[in-house]
């Protein structure tokens, strides 16, 4: 049995990694005015953040259509896939899951759609776990179970350079009421079990936010090491600083990815974002 694995561009693993690991990417879209760009295909992060800085207004984003998913599922079936595991960003933030589910209903091979209830490197960790299980010879049940273990046990903690993009883009969730940049307050944010962004803790300044994230990872990994990904939007130095803070706090972790957010997630995260996502080793 051959298991096909699908994800969307907001896993932020990038086309090269996904192609090398036989994962099919369905891109979301970013709209600057009347021009539409495919996430990670037409826009790499550097180009996107340059355009974002110069844009007179926040770009819009758009999910893939059911037809785009249906074409991907059909192509995998043509290549010999007997089942497909399709892994995507939080349904609370995007209609991507809805499009995938509609396409799955008409697919000629079974498709298991997974809502990661998270974004960027969190989705990436679920994809990576699925790939690892498939490459070991696991069937669709095992591949799905590996991804769902990540989904059900992971935590994502992050800080933004500003809340402006999240609020203007309508994705702030339960963090909507926080005042952006008021007295340099940099809230540490997280995702709740429903895939909605909510405040974790208010701190003053980016260094304090990084220290708070590191302390929480250290607490969560005290009894059992975690697999962890670091991510950032425009500053690799911030990701390195968070890594150093994790070590200083005594966190027990295996770093499996240091990633960068792409255009769709970057539309809402904005410049200066940094975070960590992790789950207990099985």
Image: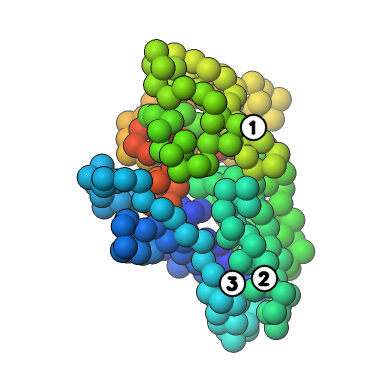
The answer to whether the residue labelled 2 contacts the one labelled 3, judged by CB atoms less than 8 Å apart, is yes
Q: Which residue is mark 3?
A: 66
Q: Which mark is residue 225?
A: 1
The Cα–Cα distance between marks 2 and 1, rounded to whole angstroms, is: 38 Å
Q: Which residue in the rendered view is the most extreme toward the right?
A: 141
Q: Is residue 115 left or right of residue 158?
A: right
Q: Is residue 58 left or right of residue 178?
A: left
**Which residue is depicted at the point 51% across and 66% down?**
64
Mark 1: few, some, or many residues within 10 Å (few <14, many ≥20)?
some
Name the one closer to the observer, 19 or 180. Answer: 180
Name the one closer to the observer, 271 or 252. Answer: 271
**Which residue is depicted at the point 69% across and 30% down?**
224
- Decide if residue 254 is in sight here: no
Picture quarter with the C terminus: top right
**Which residue is depicted at the point 39% across and 13% down?**
183
**Which residue is depicted at the point 43% across and 39% down?**
168
């Amino acid at each position: 049995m051959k298991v096909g694995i699908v994800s969307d561009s907001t896993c932020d693993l990038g086309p090269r990694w996904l192609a090398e690991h036989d994962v099919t990417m369905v891109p979301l879209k970013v709209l600057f005015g009347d021009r539409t760009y495919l996430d990670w295909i037409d826009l790499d992060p550097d180009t996107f953040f340059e355009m974002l800085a110069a844009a007179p207004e926040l770009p819009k984003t758009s999910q893939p259509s059911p037809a785009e998913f249906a074409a991907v599922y059909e192509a995998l079936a043509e290549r010999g896939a007997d089942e497909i595991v399709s892994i995507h960003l939080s349904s609370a933030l995007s209609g991507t899951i809805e499009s995938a589910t509609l396409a799955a209903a008409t697919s000629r091979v079974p498709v298991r759609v997974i809502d990661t209830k998270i974004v960027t490197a969190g989705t990436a960790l679920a994809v990576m776990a699925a790939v690892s299980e498939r490459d070991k010879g696991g069937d669709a049940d095992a591949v799905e179970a590996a991804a769902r273990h990540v989904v059900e046990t992971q935590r994502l903690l992050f800080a933004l350079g500003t809340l402006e993009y999240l609020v203007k883009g309508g994705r702030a969730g339960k963090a909507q009421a926080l005042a952006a940049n008021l007295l340099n307050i940099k809230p540490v944010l997280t995702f709740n079990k429903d895939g909605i962004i909510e405040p974790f803790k208010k701190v003053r300044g980016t260094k304090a936010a990084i220290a708070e994230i590191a302390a929480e990872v250290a607490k969560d990994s005290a009894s059992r090491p975690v697999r962890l990904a670091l991510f950032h939007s425009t500053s690799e130095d911030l990701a390195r600083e968070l890594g150093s803070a994790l070590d200083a706090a005594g966190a027990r972790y295996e770093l499996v990815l240091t990633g960068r957010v792409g255009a769709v997630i970057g539309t809402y995260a904005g410049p200066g974002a940094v975070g960590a996502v992790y789950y207990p080793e099985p």
